[in-house]
Amino acid sequence: MYNMEISDLFRISSNLAGSISLDKKRYLYDRISWTVPMLCVKGARGIGKTTMFLQRMHSAFKDEEALYVALDNIWFSEHRLIDLVDYHYNHGGTHLFADEVHRYPFQNWIQEMKNINDSYPGYHVAFTGSSLLKIDMSKADLSRRCIFYDMQGMSFREYLSFKGVADLPAYSLDDILHHPIEIAQEVLKQVRPLQYFGDYLKHGYYPFYDKYASTYAEALQQIINTIIENDIPTSLNIEKLTVNKFKRLLFIISKMVPFTPNISKLGTSLETNRIQTYNMLEVLSKAALINSLYSGKSNMQQLSKPEKIYLENTNFLHALSSDVEIGNARETFFANQLKQGHTITFSGQGDFLIDGQYTIEVGGKDKTFDQIKDLPNSFLAIDDAEYGHQNKIPLWLFGFLY
């Protein structure tokens, strides 16, 4: 059996950082406070967390000041993270970039992070987790020591940049709602967005889209399977029977989205009770597989039951179905893009209520205000339109929020 030495970790780190491209960076890169002693980037698999860490190493450090390690590396089957930090620190190291903390084989990684923070002054640790679950549960324990960031897949704006079509700024929601014509004019100076919007909905959410031109759907299906079969069990210590129920639940959702769930019927289909069904829906949501929309009211029953459920992103829609309904894709896109930095809840009259303030109805370019005409701060997000007017906003423009 190959006996991996600590020097091998440094060699792997150097090779990875040295070969990474700095041409395109994800939106979160410039928002992170890289100088803090400890930070965590949470997010789904495949959205570019590892690449972002390697880009930071390549651009900000030299020699062995910084070290990248994947925490599922075989070296950690016999050694602890704090042992690596001790060696690195004593040899002049200052920064550790640790990937996939949920795959670390020892249970007390939280305590190790605390000990590293206490015992090695001036040393910096940044870590990621593809599963959102375990990190969420540990957040309270690390809240005084660690800054947490949530990372999402690519926006439509980022897709245009990564594709080499146009480099454009992000806009705030208020700017998009109140100055849509001016923003659209600036965008249209560089690109005709509708030319690329359909492609984005099918295969633009993950940065690796260009590497899997013919097998992109299969790659996404593998990500889904890995999350359900590996990340969720690792985080929750559940049995294989429950893993199969998660698969069945996601299959049911993928064939019906968007839909208002009947918890009793779902429970019967899964051969489980209502509480477990609620818990499973919450897990799928935190694992970035679905997007659950709640009423936002204070009643506890209303808070626990989703009013509507979508798949997390439109790429999942196309990967799991050969016949995607356009209205479903529109609402899924809108819900996905708005959840980055905003509170999105169910609206009884329109499709969505944003930050408890704006009511948004999503539809085609012939959509009317009839359903929301009496509501203040109400807007239409309309597809197949380059420009909006009055309170009609082009749907694609909501892809410029980050």
Image: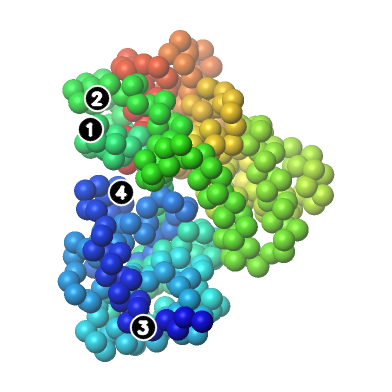
The disc placed on residue 186 is none
- Residue 202 to residue 289: above or below: above
Tell me the residue that label 2 is attached to. 191
223 on left or right of 83: right
User: Disc 3 residue type?
Assistant: Ile
The disc placed on residue 26 is 4
Disc 2/disc 3 C-alpha distance (Å): 49 Å
Residue 239: percent from left, percent from top? 72, 64
Q: Which SS class for mark 3?
A: helix
Question: Marks 2 and 1: in contact by CB < 8 Å?
Answer: yes
Q: Which one is earlier in the sequence, the residue at label 4 or at label 1?
A: 4
134 on left or right of 51: right
User: Disc 2 residue type?
Assistant: Val
Q: Residue at x 50, y 73 (%)?
A: 104
**Residue 34 visible at all:** no
Tell me the residue that label 1 is attached to. 166
